[in-house]
Amino acid sequence: MMEMMWQDLVFLAGSILSIVFLAPTIKDASARVPLGSSVPSMTIGGIYAFTYGTMGMTFSAAGSIGVAVMWSLIACYRAPGEQGMANVLRFATDLGRQTRDIVQIALPTTDGGHEQSQTEHQSSYHQSAD
């Protein structure tokens, strides 16, 4: 029989407290939590649950799943805008667009044999427009 680690119970207690503290947000229909907070927290809860599970910390894994579910509910029903899973998809799409924009700005572009970064291109455009 496998012996339970005391740390498993400590992590479970922390997860239970998180769930208790998140419950009022779910109950409050007027609460608005940005997706930039709820989706990463939901993802981290899922990663923690998986990690605890691979370490044999069953109670910690269950607690982290509970936290991930709470953050999922907050992302779906307490984010600004429409309700439902579309919020999470909207966040992922927006994050992908922002990442693409950052990569395009960071990578130099070739313009007629003269390399010019997107930022330099934008600043020279603004100067010529003045």
Image (cartoon, helix red, strand yellow):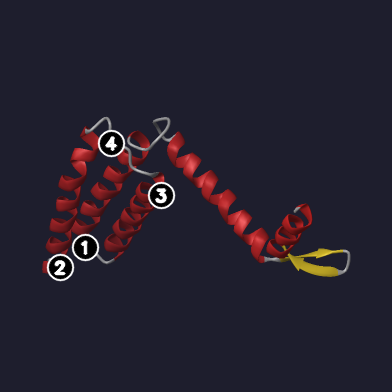
> Helix or strand or loop: what does disc 3 sit on?
helix
Measure the C-alpha gap from mark 4 to mark 2. Answer: 34 Å
Measure the C-alpha gap from mark 3 to mark 2. Answer: 30 Å
The tag on residue 57 is 1
The tag on residue 36 is 3
Q: Residue at x 63, y 61 (%)?
A: 103
Quadrant hosting residue 102: bottom right
Q: Residue 51, position in %: x, y?
A: 32, 63
> Helix or strand or loop: what does disc 4 sit on?
loop
The residue carrying pointer 3 sits among few (fewer than 14), some (14 to 19) or many (20 or more) residues within 10 Å by Cα, namely few
Q: Amino acid at mark 1?
A: Met
Of callouts 4 and 2, the N-terminal one: 2
Asked if the residue under mark 2 is in contact with the one under mark 1, i.e. CB atoms within 8 Å, the reply is: yes
Q: Which residue is mark 4?
A: 31
Q: Nearer the viewer, mark 1 or mark 4?
A: 4
Residue closer to the observer: 69 or 125: 125
Q: Residue 83, position in %: x, y?
A: 39, 30
Q: Residue at x 35, y 58 (%)?
A: 47
Measure the C-alpha gap from mark 1 to mark 2. Answer: 9 Å
Of callouts 1 and 3, the N-terminal one: 3
Image quarter (top left, top right, bottom left or bottom right) of the C terminus: bottom right
Q: Examine the rendered structure and indicate whether residue 28 appears above or below residue 43.
A: above
Measure the C-alpha gap from mark 3 to mark 4. Answer: 15 Å
Q: Amino acid at mark 4?
A: Ala
Q: Amino acid at mark 2?
A: Gln
> Helix or strand or loop: what does disc 2 sit on?
helix
Of callouts 3 and 2, the N-terminal one: 2
